[in-house]
Image (cartoon, rainbow, N blue to C red):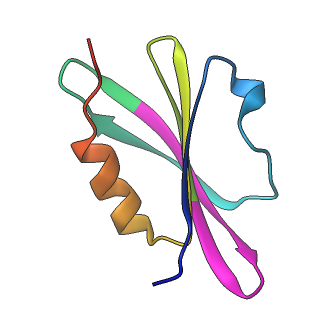
Amino acid sequence: NEHLVYFQLSANEKDLSQGNWTDKEKVQVETLDDEVEVEMGKISENDEKNYYAIWKYRDSYYELSGQIEKEEILKILNEMQYNL
């Protein structure tokens, strides 16, 4: 539906996008072998709400963001699988 969603994987937290995010909160997400703390929030751009999630798993940093509802981001995070 012409909505964009971005997924970024980085070895360095500084490489993730930085923005003026609001409504920041931390949530816990279960993985197959651990629990991960995820920072979530939103930003408004061009009258669109954009949500984001940033987290670290093992030695990598992840970011998922875009024109997607918070509930959808949580669903994706709960269903993600990582190579062990």
> Horizontal and vertical percent for residue 77?
34, 46
Looking at the image, residue 33 lies above or below residue 76: above
Which one is in front, 41 or 67? 67
Residue at point 52%, 33% (across, down): 55
- The residue sitting at 28% across, 39% down in the picture is 80
Nearest the viewer among 66 and 29 is 66
The structure residue drawn at horizontal position 69% and vertical position 19%, both measured from the top left corner, is 12
Say whether residue 70 is left or right of residue 51. Answer: left
Q: Is residue 40 magenta?
A: yes
Residue 61 falls left or right of residue 46: left
How far from the left and from the top, in percent, is residue 2? 53, 81
Q: Is residue 3 above or below residue 33?
A: below
Residue 75: quarter of image:
bottom left
Seen in the picture, residue 35 relative to 21 is either above or below; the reply is above
Q: Is residue 70 left or right of residue 82?
A: right
Q: Residue furthest bottom?
A: 47
The span shown in magenta is: 37-51
Along the viewing direction, whichever of 63 and 1 lies nearer the viewer = 1
Question: Could you say which quadrant of the image residue 61 lies in?
Answer: top right
Q: Residue at x 44, y 13 (%)?
A: 58
Quadrant occupied by the C terminus? top left
Q: Main secondary structure of the magenta part?
A: strand
Q: Is residue 39 magenta?
A: yes
Q: Position of residue 20 (x, y in %)?
A: 81, 58
